[in-house]
Amino acid sequence: MITLEDIRRPIMAELAAFDEFVDRQFTAEGELLSEMLRYALSSRGKGIRPMLVMLSAALNAPVKGAATGRRACLAAMLVEMIHVASLIHDDVIDEADTRRGRASVNARWQSHKAVILGDYILARNMSIGLQSGQFDLVTHICGSMSALCEGEVLQDECAANRTMTMRSYLDIIYKKTACLLGVSASAGALAVGATRDKVSSMRRFGEAVGMAFQIQDDILDYTPTAQTGKPACNDLREGKITLPLLIVLERSDEARQNELLADLSRCHEDAAAVERIRSAVESEGGLSAAGTVMQGYIRRATEMLADYADSEYRSALVNLCAYIAERDR
Ligand code: FPP
Ligand code: MG
């Protein structure tokens, strides 16, 4: 089993420089805002996005060690803080009480403060980015913020109408997750001056990784033994049709579809309805079929690395692909 430690090993110095950069740059005025900011930044999760930035920077750097530079740290900060802010806002929208096994910002300080904290993080991010004068990186990375919002609105519309198509599902997960992972991988290459071709090939790599990452997230939501720090079947309680259920719906006749959709409309208040859908998705092959789609993206991502000469950075990215497919957290 590949661990995140294995993947981080070749870029330990770069990630330490990144943490120090964030600690130095990301401070707030005022006691309450400082406390909330510290809380939000003290449990940042797996750090997949900074890892992608740094590994891509190291892989594409003309000389070994060039990735520890300020531009790579700045790129990693820009993507990670967009991600942090989006989750703070997402928990407000989803009325989620927990994130990564502890109280969400909205649960601890109320929603209106969580909205402001998310806005503040975005504002600081933009201001630090612009003050750095690295306009190519700021433009490249901050363009992805609108995709996140578009994905969220689309997802919300589909949940409210209890409808989903494969096309909408893929569009949503591209916008809410894959786009920012693609931007992370390509920003690493851009930070070290890689050619336009390399930047766009890293973008496609990161996007494939991101599609797989979100599908695995959606599979783990159905897995009570997963260590995600969130209650199982949260998506069902939020009325979301993700790939495992979508596959089962697409395989069912109209009567069965209506039965499943009627249960879905009760999920926010009826634990038995949640359990009926969860068990149907498992026994009717929704989880394994979603796993096959996810593996397809992982294979595509791994194949894209074949153009690079063998190195510890390339191996770490191959391992990252494997980790995403195997992970239970
Ligand atoms: C988590 O999804 C949410 C996202 C990946 C993106 C959320 C985006 C917004 C709220 C738009 C705001 C954008 C910016 C730039 C601030 P999820 O609810 O499926 O995952 P979860 O189970 O971890 O909550
Ligand atoms: Mg959510």
Image: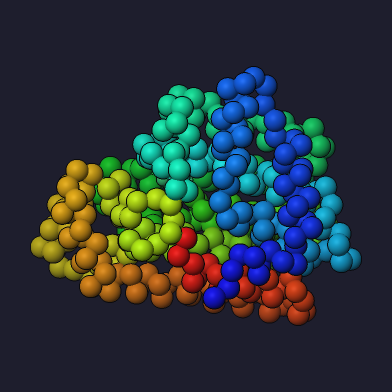
* x and y percentages locating residue 116 in the rendered image: 53, 26
Horizontal arrangement in the rendering, residue 235 relative to residue 36 (left or right): left
* x and y percentages locating residue 208 in the rendered image: 55, 66
* x and y percentages locating residue 140 in the rendered image: 69, 47
Q: Is residue 149 visible?
A: no
Residue at (49% x, 25% y) in the render: 113
Q: Is residue 101 visible?
A: yes
Residue at (39% x, 50% y) in the render: 230
Give the quadrant of residue 232. bottom left
- Please determine whether, in this image, residue 185 is positioned above or below residue 144: below
The outermost residue toward the right is 63
Horizontal arrangement in the rendering, residue 228 relative to residue 85 (left or right): left
Residue at (75% x, 74% y) in the render: 312
The outermost residue toward the left is 255
Front-most of residues 169 and 215: 215
The quarter of the rendered structure image containing the N terminus is bottom right
Front-most of residues 245 and 100: 100
Total marks shown come to 0
- Please determine whether, in this image, residue 268 is positioned above or below residue 222: above
- Please determine whether, in this image, residue 276 is positioned above or below residue 140: below
Residue at (67% x, 21% y) in the render: 29
Give the quadrant of residue 194. bottom right
Front-most of residues 150 and 241: 241
* x and y percentages locating residue 307 in the rendered image: 72, 77
